[in-house]
Image: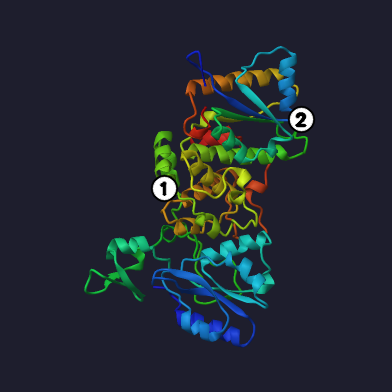
Amino acid sequence: MQKVTASQLIDRAAALLSDGSVSAVLGWKQGEFDYDITPAVFADEQALRDAFVWNDFCGANFSKYLLKATKKVDGKVLVFLKPCDTYSFNQLLTEHRFDRDKVYAIGIPCEGMADIDKVKAQSGDGIVSIACGETIQVTTLYNDAPVSVELADVLEERCANCKSKKHVAYDELLGDEGDVLDSARFDEVAQLEAMTPDERFAFWQEHLSRCIRCNACRDVCPACTCEKCVFDNPASGVENKAPANEFEEKMFHIIRAFHVAGRCTDCGECSRVCPQNIPLHLLNRKFIKDMNDNYGEYQAGAEVGSRAPLVDFTLDDPEAADVLDRRG
Amino acid sequence: MQVNGEFKPLIVAFCCNWCSYAGADLAGNNRLNYPAEVKIIRVPCSCRVNPTFILRAFQRGADGVILCGCHPGDCHYTSGNYYTRRRMAMLFSMLDYLGIERERTRVEWVSAAEGAKFAATMNDFVAQVTALGENKRLEDLRCKK
């Protein structure tokens, strides 16, 4: 269960709307299903009261939505940021992607978000409705009584390995401030590194061959904000189309991960939106881990204006061969 | 590629215009041998090499890719090869992570005065890739003849 309630958020947003300090609110509303919560822009209090949602399925990171919202809306945009979203927020500010003066950011604590696949594993298919309270109550076609699911048991992977409950950017904070956590997020990368090359190849072949090139990972990524993308350019040879063979699957994912290397805040949106459940965060975390190991600890978005490892250098960086040898 | 039943690798070498390409030239002037399997692509600076170039080379059938630039500190553009060093270290580490043999990729610093080093490096790299055999993991099979 989340520590702040939807009504707290709605009341605060309504107050700011009515005194004119913001002219739109970036928040969540229900999509087709109860667990399908989508981002939305609310322009008045009535719309907020009618449709604003805040529960255990509000995974969307709003930082990237600010790019368009701040251009479309006259006046300030109110945005709700979970701790991990604030890192992306800072990273986009570092890259001058939106105007900070046009944003009013409210930090909200987050207890982690639920992964619907894990919920389904406990409740079974045929979900009719979901109510988020102390526990998640799932009503399905095949059970007479609602199935009660604990949020802690169905956390998304990124939330189970949460890197920080601390907000690094906000104008106002609702609830209590958390801490940067000592998470085990690189354990899975280390496990993969310990495998033989053949095992790793088989692992990635199995996952990447499911890719349907829907480009959801690119579209949702707060680090992917180029207006002209290499994947939209037919001359690049990696344009938007279904991968025809093993190579194209790998090519797309290597390039995507490389383009955000050093700028990826590890918000985990790519893995969350992947319809094929490809563990894309393992590619991003590999880059983060390598950079931490070789060029010093760096967390993208921890502060505005920091230099990412790949646009920086020192005179005594390790050679490519040494980087590989060091890991053995 | 199979020639008379013997495997001959296709090696793509990206050489920077100011050091390594001149180093290759010097190797030729000095009549030093290096294998004909090495195809040199001249780039203005090792930093010009986009990771996509490397992947593209593998896609089109290269069995190994080597990137040669000026020694760190000697870059014609002052700092290009320092960026290359970080970039390629990360890319090659990622390829290794995906299960591509790490012996197929290499970064080597060769100055314009090191014709002998250029020839020795190429001989060594070609031998290394020949021992590995054909690149199957990063190749677009439609590019096969």
Nearer to the camera, A238 or A223: A238
The correct choice, above or below, for A125 with respect to A203 in the image is below
Assign a secondary structure to mark 2: loop
For mark 2, does the 10 Å Cα neighbourhood hold few (<14), some (14 to 19), or many (20 or more) residues?
Answer: many
* Residue A328, numbered label: none
Q: Chain of mark 2?
A: B
Q: Chain of mark 1?
A: A
Q: Quadrant of residue A87?
A: bottom right
* Residue highlighted by disc 2: B18
Q: Residue at x 62, y 87 (%)?
A: A19
Residue B40, given in percent of the width and then of the height, sits at 67, 26
For mark 1, does the 10 Å Cα neighbourhood hold few (<14), some (14 to 19), or many (20 or more) residues?
Answer: some
**1 and 2 marks on the same chain:** no
- Residue placed furthest toward the bottom: A18
For residue A188, side relative to residue A88 (left or right): left
- Residue placed furthest toward the left: A144
Amino acid carrying mark 2 in the image: Trp
The correct choice, above or below, for B22 with respect to A20 in the image is above
Amino acid carrying mark 1 in the image: Arg
Q: Quadrant of residue B89?
A: top right
Nearer to the camera, B86 or A207: A207
The correct choice, above or below, for A315 with respect to A43 in the image is above
* Residue highlighted by disc 1: A210
